[in-house]
Amino acid sequence: MRKLALLLLLAATSALGHAKLVSSEPAARAKVKSPQQIKLTFSETLEPAFSGATLTDAAGRNLPVPAAVGASAITLLPMALKPGGYTVTWHGVGHDTHRMSGSFGFTVVP
């Protein structure tokens, strides 16, 4: 009986997960040629109206880039990025309405 209760508790807890960043292209701390897109993949479906990402350069300036939120991914489409450091700052809201956020950097090399 105890095992059954524990299993039910674990099943309920896993159903309440949050939209966590699972991977990104380019990856955090990667050194890459100028990417044609930046893709963030999440652990669950996102609520597009409450999820998004921004791109800043090494000086902290926001770069205007088209962004799309679909299913469990956020995609940024930057124009040709000059060599240097960049930071992606993201926020994602899943069906549980809990907001998760974070950031990571990568470097564009010549």
Image (spheres, rainbow, N blue to C red):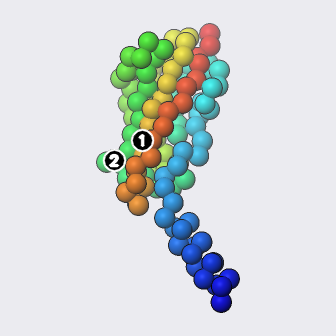
Identify which residue is drawn at 63% across, 78% down: 7
Residue 65, position in %: x, y? 39, 26
Q: Give the number of the disc on residue 91.
A: 1
Quarter where residue 53 is shown: top left
Q: Is residue 70 at all visible to an observer of this figure?
A: no
The total of numbered circles placed on residues is 2
Q: CA distance from mark 1 to mark 2?
A: 8 Å
Identify which residue is drawn at 49% across, 64% down: 16
Secondary structure beneath label 1: strand
Cβ–Cβ below 8 Å for labels 1 and 2? yes
Q: Please, is residue 35 above or below residue 74 in the view? A: above
Quarter where residue 64 is shown: top left
Locate the C terminus and report the quarter of the image it occupies. top right
Q: Residue furthest front?
A: 2
Q: Please, is residue 63 above or below residue 28 in the view? A: above
Q: Please, is residue 48 above or below residue 13 in the view? A: above
Q: Give the number of the disc on residue 50.
A: 2
